[in-house]
Image: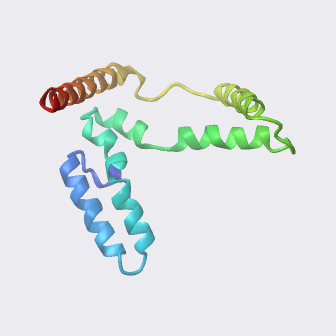
Amino acid sequence: MMSICSVGAADADKAEKLLRNLAQRLERDWSGVASSILEGIDEILTVTRLGLPKELRRSLACTNMIENVMSTVRRVCRNVKRWRSASMAMRWTAAAMQEAAKGFRRLKAHKQLPALRAALEAHQNKNSHGVLARQAIAA
């Protein structure tokens, strides 16, 4: 499956239309895949909808960072044969994440992170005003 970034669909509406079209084409032979796409369409398009610069959008849309951390957690924790408690699992996971952090590199688009912060604040403000308006109407 093509990523939204590779299609060049910076516009969220265009990207959503492409994803819905893909899901429709997959429905007959791979209904589970099609329903997963439709179920996660909002999450898939989150980065695109924030209107971030292309390089930052591309970095954030990639799952390599998460996969790297999860791989390190699995590697560090694989020798534990008996988990005695939830706090033990949390300690081992935290230790594994600290191990993974040793290999972290700076995000290629790190200079554009202020744009991410501004976009997230604008999104939060927009949503909080909508919630306040709904609460006022309900009251």
Placement of 123 over or under 84, stated as above or below? above
Which corner quadrant of the image does residue 105 belong to? top right
Colour setting: rainbow
The quadrant the N terminus occupies is bottom left
For the point 74% across and 27% down, which residue is it?
91
Left of 32 or right of it: where is 98?
right
- The answer to whether any part of residue 43 appears in the image is yes
Q: For the C terminus, give its image quadrant.
A: top left
- Relative vertical location of residue 64 with respect to residue 110 in this rendering, above or below: below
On the image, the x and y values in percent for residue 44 come to 36, 49
Pinpoint residue 110: horizontal percent, then vertical percent: 42, 23
Taking the spot 36% from the left edge, 74% from the top edge, the residue there is 26
In the foreground, 33 or 83: 83
Q: How many numbered marks does the figure carry? A: 0
In front: 125, or 113?
125
| Above or below, comparing residue 114 to residue 61 in the picture | above
| Frontmost residue, 36 versus 114 | 36
> Residue placed farthest to the front in the image?
139
Across and down, in percent, residue 67 comes to 59, 44
In the rendered image, the residue lying farthest to the bottom is 28
Residue at position x 76%, y 31% in the image: 92
Instruction: Name above or below for residue 94 compared with residue 42.
Output: above
Answer left or right for 9 relative to 65: left
Taking the spot 25% from the left edge, 61% from the top edge, the residue there is 18
Is residue 1 in view from this perspective?
no
Q: Report x, y in % for residue 31.
A: 41, 74
